[in-house]
Image (cartoon, rainbow, N blue to C red):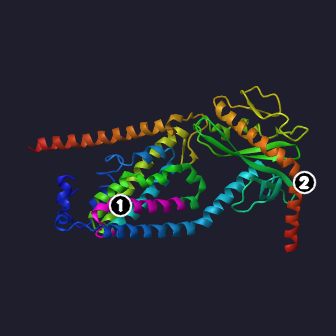
Amino acid sequence: MSRVRSNEITWETFSEGLWKENPVFVMLLGMCPVLAVTNSALNALAMGLATAFVLLASSTLVSLLSQYIPKQVRIATYIVIIATFVTIVDYVIQAISLDLYNSLGAFIQLIVVNCMILGRAEAYASKHRPLKSIVNALGMSAGFTIALLCLGVVREILGAGSLFGFQLFSDNFQPWVVMVLPAGGFLVLGAWLLLFDWYNQRQQERLLKENEHAN
Amino acid sequence: MNTTDNSINTSDHQQPVTPSGRMIAVLTGIAMISGFLVVLTSQLTAPFIEENQRIAIEQAVSKVIPGSVTHQAYTILDNKISIAEKGQSGSLIYAGFDANGKLLGIASKAAAQGYAGMIYLLYGYDPKCQCIRGIKVLKLSETPGLGDKIITDSHFQKNFDQLDAHLNAENTKLQNPIITVKHGTKKEYWEIDAISGATISSKAVGKAINTSAQSLLPTLVPLMQQLKELSQKKSAQKESEL
């Protein structure tokens, strides 16, 4: 990230959360919900959206208030702001569906300690204008939600033979129960990281070769 | 603090140290905004959450009391039964009635330690056959694919079509305690046939029902007449209102 306080909003502001600085696959932040609630696509989507709301709202508020917040108490202030929005999400999900609330369990409340959100508040929102912070938070949220969905979809298909609750295979399909258990989270996350790394490495090699040819 | 941070916050070095009064003011301000937002959301969502919880219990009760149309919550305290009100102590039961207001059964909550945590369930008691007519698991944290079969396994659910829960002659305890037996060895009406591969979870279901029924039924059965009168009075009241 550039150290210049530029207020230009570019495509990069949004897209770095999607790919270059993807919170899950590149920065490996907020692993707790990533591993814990991605046992079905619906849970993953709900968790992604809940986190997105908290990230967006807290980034906006932190960025608006950043010049009034004394440096010494900034972390405490950020945590209070984040906790407020998490509590709001908690109530809203209870109002939408109790089943969803029960399946997400304690992980809604644990969004408070998702280091991606605090990290964004400290490293980005407090140093940029509100609009730019919002665009960046949108990109980060999208990257986080997509990453959660990547895990959730694979785990639900393999572990339960369904997608968003719809049965995909006939009764002959024997679900891989391990995939919906915690161990499956690690397996699928490992596989995705492997895929990402392999792709990145290939890109770098291609760049190197092109440079050699040019020389 | 490392050097890069210093380079970002160079402006702070020229400033005097922030007075603690300002820190307190900012924190108080933020806390007040936060409190306001939380209370606002809580107020706005409360009716929806209450409605969701009511629907969830309603659905569970109508599942464990087959054929019931309307439901009413009652509390039992000191051998007296009364219509449940908010914040009242005593054990909570739900009565299910058919369309004509006839009492069909009583539902009560039960809980026991399963394999990976507590299993909470609701079971329906039919006073006519003195048996349990259905269960619904409310919350569990059992292993997916194994322990959670207690919800999905239709053979296991059949145990509760007519599970015997007769009281002894003195109305002090169940004639035969409800017990979970090994898969395929169920012989008696008060036995629950376990799921093979999920024995601990099956046993927990049996234990939960037995513990709850042993304490609830001896007090409930003598109160049955009182409950019927109470419900008739209520339906009569409703008719006169109409």
Can you tell which quarter of the image residue A139 is in?
A: bottom left
A17 and A70: which is toward the camera: A70
Question: Residue B205 shows which numbered tag?
Answer: none
Q: Nearer the viewer, mark 2 or mark 1?
A: 2
Circle 1 residues within 10 Å: few <14, some 14–19, many ≥20: many
Magenta range is A65-92
The answer to whether residue A45 is above or below residue B134 is: below
Q: Is residue A78 left or right of residue B141?
A: left
Residue A44 point in image, percent of width and height: 48, 50
Q: Position of residue B151 (x, y in %)?
A: 67, 41
Q: Quadrant of residue B228?
A: bottom right
Q: Which residue is mark 2?
A: B225
Residue at position x 57%, y 40% from top? A169
Query: Could you tell me residue A64's position as x and y percent?
Result: 33, 70
Q: Quadrant of the C terminus of chain A?
A: top left
Prevailing secondary structure class for the magenta stretch in the rendered image: helix
x and y, in percent, of residue A213 in the image: 12, 42
Rendered image: mark on residue A137: 1
